[in-house]
Image: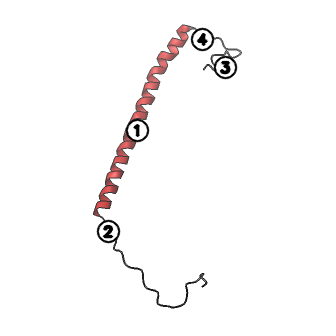
């Protein structure tokens, strides 16, 4: 699908020649490659942090003592609980 203004000239600007386009593309390639390398590095660091967090959380759950469960206390009063009507 081609956009209606894709490649449309702007007033006061001439269309670049094929040589100018090739020069722009050639100068943009290393910049884009550097940005992609930085993004890949950030993703790698993030994945490492998530791995360490998950491993630490898993170890802390394995070593934690299980909670002791106690039975609920018996009701000592014969009065009905608040908010209830019989």
Instruction: Name the residue that disc number 2 marks.
Output: 66
Against 57, residue 78 (above or below) is below
Against 63, residue 10 (above or below) is above
Mark 2 to mark 1: distance in Å? 36 Å
Q: Reading the chain from its start, which is encountered first: label 2 or label 3? A: 3
Q: Residue at x 37, y 39 (%)?
A: 44
Q: On the rendered image, what quadrant is the N terminus found in?
A: top right
Mark 2 to mark 3: distance in Å? 65 Å
Mark 3 to mark 4: distance in Å? 16 Å
Q: Nearer the viewer, residue 79 or 45?
A: 79
Q: Nearer the viewer, mark 4 or mark 1?
A: 1
Q: Reading the chain from its start, which is encountered first: label 3 or label 4? A: 3
Instruction: Verify CB contact (< 8 Å) between mark 3 and mark 4.
Output: no
Q: Which mark is residue 5?
A: 3
Q: Where residue 85 appears, x then y in whole percent?
A: 61, 84
Query: Residue lying farthest left?
Result: 63
Q: Nearer the viewer, residue 35 or 76?
A: 76
Q: Where residue 22 appears, x then y in whole percent?
A: 51, 12
Q: Which mark is residue 43?
A: 1
Please state if 33 lies on the left or on the right of 17 as rendered.
left
Q: Reading the chain from its start, which is encountered first: label 4 or label 2? A: 4
Q: In terms of secondary structure, where does tag 1 sit?
A: helix
């Amino acid at each position: 699908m081609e956009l209606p203004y894709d490649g449309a000239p702007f007033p006061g600007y001439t269309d670049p020649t094929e040589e100018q386009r090739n020069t722009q593309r050639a100068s943009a390639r290393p910049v884009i490659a550097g940005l992609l390398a930085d993004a890949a590095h950030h993703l790698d660091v993030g994945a490492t942090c998530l791995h360490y967090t998950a491993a630490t959380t898993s170890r802390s759950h394995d070593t934690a003592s299980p909670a002791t469960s106690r039975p609920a206390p018996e009701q000592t009063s014969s009065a009905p609980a608040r908010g209830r009507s019989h």
